[in-house]
Image (cartoon, rainbow, N blue to C red):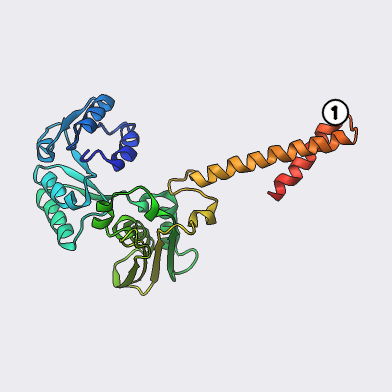
Amino acid sequence: MAGLGVASTQILPSVSKLPYVKVAAAADVRQEALAKFRKEYGAEVYTNFDEMCESPNIDFVYVATPNELHARHVIAAAERGKHAIVEKPMALTLEECEAMNAAAEKNGTKLLCGHTHSFDPPIRKIRAIVQSGELGSLRMIHSWNYNEFMYRPRMKHELATSRGVVLNQGPHQVDVARLIGGGMVRSLRATTGIWDSARPHEGSYVCYLEFENGVPATLVYSGYGFFDTAELFWWVGEGGQKSEKENQRDHELTGRRIVERADALRWAEGRRVQPRLARRAASAVFRFHAREL
């Protein structure tokens, strides 16, 4: 693992449970992060990335270092015969991306850019339906995403090097659209927006691209938090889990139902209904109100 920042805390717990993967080492410049990693995984630790790649116990490296280091670290890994998975964005310039590809090809190593939503089962199912032609030819693709990305705890340096949402979130939408569209893009036009002077980095974009077969796609993203598109599909997060907002809504709904049931019991008791019948009446009123909610 190269880099023990936020990304590593999301990756390592899951990867370490895979029967075909062994967490063998980590590199970071912070001693406290390395000490915590060694305690949790009992693996090698390094303060120098190149030295870690020299270890014979490593087959591939997950590069989750700062964006501006992605290219250098992937190339260094390839030169030492190590496969690499690199966090998005792949790099900061097209020239760096081409150099990374060239290094992998020259040294016979594998290079994967992750994490990729094109591996998500729903996205792959959509691609299969498109390929089958059972619903006819693909005519257009639209991907809209609104959330509070620009107001999440993020370092200004990270937002600057990733151009805000452009290189942070854009890769996901492009990845999904490319898989569903199933071809190369022949034209592209886009615009970005910086709408909050307190966060002087790109917080939105609108992109129009067209595949070689003429299928158009729009990719829209706003990270300014005035609306969350997760609301349109029951607050289910991108990993299939309920979002914090949905959990909060569940608590609020449960509280309202408890109040409704108590009110129903008081209503039944006020009419001197027998206890057993009072509970039945309360349950009936409760179910009625639950349907309304």
Whether residue 166 can be seen here? yes
In the displayed structure, would residue 28 be above or below residue 138? Answer: above
Q: Is residue 156 left or right of residue 234?
A: left
In the displayed structure, would residue 29 be above or below residue 164? Answer: above
| Mark 1: amino acid | Pro
Name the element at disc 1.
Answer: helix
Q: Position of residue 168 (x, y in %)?
A: 31, 55
Q: Is residue 289 left or right of residue 67?
A: right
Q: Position of residue 207 (x, y in %)?
A: 36, 69
The residue drawn where x is 79% and y is 38% is: 264
User: Which of the pair 107/34 is nearer the observer?
Assistant: 34
Q: Position of residue 124 (x, y in %)?
A: 40, 53
The residue drawn where x is 33% and y is 58% is: 199
Q: Residues within 10 Å of mark 1 (few under 14, many from 20)?
A: few
Q: Quadrant of residue 213?
A: bottom left
Q: Quadrant of residue 256?
A: top right
Which residue is denoted by mark 1 in the rendering?
Answer: 275
Q: Position of residue 263 (x, y in %)?
A: 77, 39
The residue drawn where x is 19% and y is 37% is: 28
In the displayed structure, would residue 9 be above or below residue 102? Answer: above
Whether residue 24 can be seen here? no
